[in-house]
Image (cartoon, grey):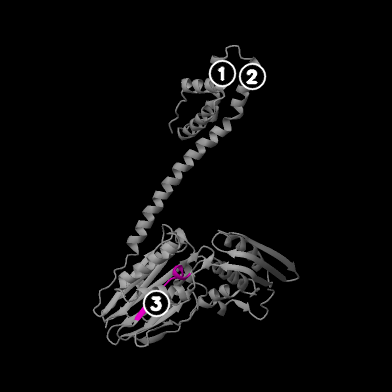
Amino acid sequence: MNINLSIDVVETDNQTVLTVKGEIDAYTAPLLKEKLLPATAKETEKIIVDLNDVTYMDSTGLGVFISALKSAKEHGSTLTLVNLQERVHRLFKITSLDSIIEIDTTIRGGE
Amino acid sequence: MKKERLDLDDYRKLLKQYLLTHDETALYQAEQLSKLSVQHNVSPEEIIHVHIEALKELYPELQQEVSDSLNFLLEAMISYGLALQEYQSLREKQSALESEISVAANMQKTLLQTKKPTISGLDIGAISVPANQMNGDYYHFIEGSDGTLGIALADVIGKGVPAALAMSMIKYSMDSFPEQLRQPAQILESLNRVVERNVDTSMFITMFYGLYNTNNHTFSFSSAGHEPGFFYFNKTESFSEIKARGLVLGATSDARYNEEAVTIHDGDAIILLTDGVTECHLGDRFIERDEVLEVIEHYLHLPAQEAVEKVYKHFERLQDFHLRDDFTLIILKKET
């Protein structure tokens, strides 16, 4: 089983961009949580998560994004997901989480 | 923990055999002896001690420095012996924990037991198989006194013991609802509040709730982000996805749910499942929903219970009998 996940974090003024690569599942979700949650705990931060190279995500990953959203709201920050692959996007649609988490589908590309 | 002594005679014979003949079988036997020693909690320093004694017996004229250096080695090995002891004690603790979890799993089974109802004109099949000891999937049938049948199907995200505990909470909340509260949307809204208040932020639950009215054969339903099931329509001999959208339970406190209804005719079927069915892996490849549907279609003519079991067996075989996720499938057919 491939349990590789890498996350690059780039912080600039009031903005954090996380570029995630690999599979998000029960084994790798803690790493995502560890990198994402501190960003959401900053006040009025704009957080962008690029999921272009995420080939698989299961519901544990969704749980991390729900936590992140709640934390972002508490701190007046925003969370946006970009470049979702179809299979990953489907999960957000089925669970209707796309109605509460901002997902930008317009800049999908890079392949 | 009992400690056994290494048999000095055996060791000496083995050592002598090797030193005189350089025979590989003696080396092999030494390896076996090392395995046995671990099994019997013989510490490394004990082996070195026996080695020194054996060497002295074989070579009474042993150079003092060699003997001293072996004593030195013996001291250097002491921590390894302690680590071995610790390992043994951890193994014992682990086996105790495993048996406790198995007791908990059995308790969960008893707590969450649901009786598959017998309703004339309806043929119901249900199967739920956990991937690990504790099942994160849950289904429940609620027979109303007015000819209605409530069907709840839920999947707790997060695995193992916490998921199982959350499941018990759902079950008890549903049990405590008054009988008048049985419309799918109302039930999901109430449960959403319970989950939002009581469950860790990274945990959530997907749930489908359907209400079958046996008086007029309407099926009303709502979904809280649950993997969509299917209707089978006998008249057109076709499947259609159960379209119901709604937010997963526990994500926000004020989620509202839509409710839809369809009329079920003779020979129609309602197929409900969890994502353990559609998230099946075949090596690196996922099984597509169409393939899942093909398998269900293949067995749908069978009595409902037999059909769900056959579908399960099919996917169990495909995944080499190793489920990655809990698997739950319910089929409800209106008899002709």
Quarter the N terminus of chain B occupies = top left
Is residue B275 a member of the stretch shown in magenta?
A: yes
| Chain assignment, label 2 | B
Q: What residue type is labelled 3?
A: Tyr
Among numbered discs 3 and 1, the one appearing first in the sequence: 1
Above-or-below relation of A8 to A97? above
Residue B257, image x and y in percent? 46, 82
**Disc 3: which residue:** B209
Residue at which label 2 appears: B66
Which residue is found at the position 42% from the left and 50% from the top? Answer: B98
Residue B144 in percent (x, y) is at: 28, 78
Residue B55 - label: 1
Q: Which tag is nearer the camera, tag 2 or tag 3?
A: 2
Magenta range: B269-278
Q: Nearer the viewer, residue B92 or A4?
A: A4
What residue type is disc 1 on?
Answer: Leu
Please name the amino acid that badge 2 sits on: Val
